[in-house]
């Protein structure tokens, strides 16, 4: 198993999570990383607000995802009208090691 430090783990959370239709649970990310990366989270919150104002991302409760109109991938509704299209979703969280 590879040891991943918090900055890299946070980056992986975004890369992997935003590829999924359901997006990421930003509330959980804040809880998991606040102690290790408070400055980076503050910067991310500002950037998310900017992307939200342009319509690139949307926030639903604590879930953050790429807006359907901004996504290059088919949405659930387009998949239901086209049975040949399948969107594969997988959940993968990096392991966070903080010491030792």
Image (spheres, rainbow, N blue to C red):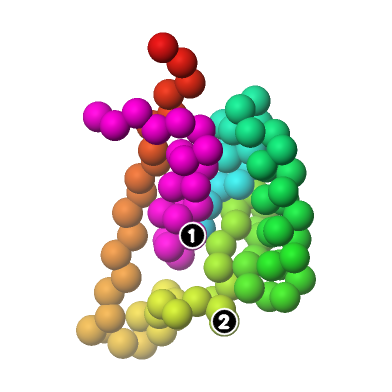
Q: x, y (%) of residue 45?
A: 72, 51
- Up the image or down, 80 lies above or below 44; here it is below
Q: Quadrant of residue 66?
A: bottom right
Q: Which residue is mark 2?
A: 69
**Crowd tier of the residue under label 2, counting other residues whose Cα lies within 10 Å: few below 14, some 14–19, many 20 or above:** few
84 in the magenta segment: no
- Find the distance from the CA under tag 1 to the CA under tag 2: 14 Å
Which residue sits furthest bottom? 81
Q: Tell me the SS state at disc 2.
A: loop
Q: x, y (%) of residue 47?
A: 71, 58
Q: Nearer the viewer, residue 25 or 53?
A: 53
Q: x, y (%) of residue 13?
A: 47, 47
What stretch of residues is rendered in magenta? 1-21
- Residue at 68% x, 42% y: name it: 41
Q: Nearer the viewer, residue 51 or 23?
A: 51
- Of labels 1 and 2, earlier in sequence is 1
- Residue at 41% x, 12% y: name it: 100
14 in the magenta segment: yes
- Up the image or down, 41 lies above or below 67; here it is above
Q: Which residue is mark 1?
A: 18
**Disc on res. 62:** none
């Amino acid at each position: 198993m590879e040891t991943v430090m918090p900055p890299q783990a946070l980056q992986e959370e975004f890369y992997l999570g935003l590829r999924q239709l359901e997006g990421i649970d930003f509330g959980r990310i804040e809880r998991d990383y606040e102690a290790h990366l408070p400055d980076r989270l503050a910067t991310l919150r500002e950037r998310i607000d900017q992307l939200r104002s342009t319509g690139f991302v949307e926030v639903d409760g604590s879930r953050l995802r790429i807006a359907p109109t901004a996504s290059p991938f088919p949405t659930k509704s387009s998949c239901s009208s086209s049975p040949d299209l399948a969107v594969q979703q997988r959940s993968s969280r990096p392991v966070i090691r903080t010491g030792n």
